[in-house]
Amino acid sequence: MVTFVPSDLSELREAVAEALAAEEPLEIVGGGSKRALGRPVQAAHTLDLSRLSGIRDYAPSELVLTAGAATPLAEIERALAKHNQMLAFEPPGWGGLLGVEDAAPTLGGVLACNLSGPRRVKAGAARDHFLGFHAVSGRAEIFKAGGKVVKNVTGYDLPKLMAGSYGTLAALEEVTVKVLPEPETVATVLFAGLAPGAAGRLMAAALGSPHEVSGAAYLPAGTTMPLTLSIRPGTAAFRVEGPAPSVAFRRDALLREHRESGAASTLDASGSLAFWRAIGEVAPLSALGESAVWRISVAPARGAAIGEAVARSLDAVWYLDWGGGLLWLAVAEREDAGAQVIRAAIRATIRGHDGHGTGHATLVKASPALRRGVPVFEPQPPPLAALSQRVKDAFDPRHILNPGRMVPTEPGGS
C-alpha cells in the first residue's frame, strides 16, 4: 500500500491520476476522525490530505472563510473566536462516540459528511453554509464550484452535492464557508418528568413560538448525560441565544408559557455550553461499550414514536435532538444491529400518521464486520439509486475514490 501526501492542488491531481492510471482505489483521509463512518473502504492506497491545511482567506466583515480542506476544526474555531464569530451549523467531532479522541476533525471532513449539531433547527445544515470548493474528481480533473460570496450564482449547486458524498465523488482541496457572529450569551430551559409524547408536543410548541429557540432536545427516562450537570429523567431542553436582555426575556417567557409541562429549571451560559456540546457529540450514548449506534432523521413529530416503537422490540437507549427530527439510538451489536426492526418502525410510524414523510436510518457506529454486512445508509428506491449511480459515474467513472464507503462496489467501476 502506498500513501500519497499531496501538498497542493497540482500534487493532489497527480496522485489521483496515478491511481486512476493503475486503477488502484484510494481511501481519502484528512484528520482520520471519520474513517469509521460508512462501510469499510475497499482501497489499495491512502490519499492523505493532511498537508492541505491552513486558513487561506478570512474576511470577518464579509462573514466568509476559506481554508485547506484538512484544516482542523479546532484551528478554525480559534480563529473565528478572535472575532466573536462561529460556524453556525455547530459541527460535531464524534471522537468519543467513534473512539478516536486523538484524531482531529477537519473542516473538509464535516462538510463531506454534512455533519450538523443541535443548532441545525435554526441555522440549517452544514451544506447550507458550504459556499464553494476546489477539488479533484475521480477523472483526475481539477474543478471548482461556488465562490467566496454568500450570494453567488454559478449554475449547479455543487457544494450541496459534495456535502454528504463522503469523499466518493471528489477529493476536496479547499473549501469556503459562511460564518456568523457568536451570540452574546446563552441559556437553557429544562422541563423534567415528561413522557415521550408530551415532550414531542412541547418541542413543537417551543420551536413554533416567537422565542427563536436554537436547540431542542429530549432525554427520556433511562438515558443519562455523562456530566456533572443534574439532568432529571424525561427532560426536554430548550436553548435561547443572543443579547443578554433578549435571552433573559425569552427564557422567562418559555418558563411562564409552559410552566404546567413539567418540573422546570434552567442552565446558565457555562452549563448550556456543556449540555449542548454533549448533545451534539452524542455523549449520552458514547459510553455504552460495544453497542451499535444509529442516527435516524425523520419528521420532528415522528421521532419520539419511533424511539418508543424500537424500544418495545429491542433493548435500546435513545434520545432526541433537532426538536424530534433527529433520533439517536443505541442497541446491542447483533447480527443486523436491529436494522430490520428500526427501518420497519420508521415505515410503520409514518404510515400510522398520515402516510406522508420519510425517514432515514444511518448506522454510525458498529464493528467493521457489521458495517460490511448491513446497509449502513438508508437503501434508496431504484430510480434514486440509478440517479446516484449516474452521478457517481460522472465524477468517478472507475470508482477509485473511497470505493464501497456508501454502497458495495467493485473497484474499477461498472
Image (cartoon, helix red, strand yellow):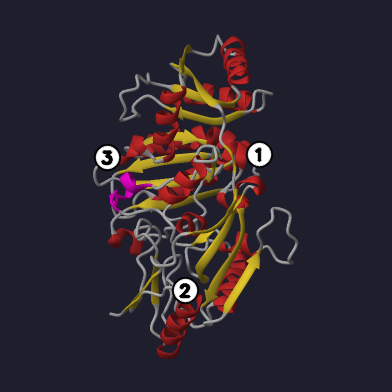
Residue annotated with mark 3: 288
Decide if residue 123 is in sight here: yes
Specify the amino acid type for callout 3.
Leu
Which residue is nearer to you in this view: 313 or 194?
A: 194
Outermost residue on the left side: it is 289
Q: Residue at x 49, y 30 (%)?
A: 217
Q: Which mark is residue 60?
A: none
Q: Position of residue 69 (x, y in %)?
A: 48, 62
267 is within the stretch colored magenta: no
Residue annotated with mark 1: 354
Query: Toward which corner of the image does residue 66 lie, by quadrant?
Result: bottom right
Decide if residue 316 is in sight here: no
Mark 3 vs mark 1, foreground winner is 3
Q: CA distance from mark 2 to mark 3?
A: 41 Å
Residue annotated with mark 2: 8
99 is within the stretch colored magenta: yes
Q: Is residue 268 above or below residue 84?
A: above
Specify the amino acid type for callout 2.
Asp
Mark 2 vs mark 3, foreground winner is 2
Query: Toward which corner of the image does residue 274 lie, by quadrant?
Result: top left
- The residue stretch that appears in magenta: 94-102
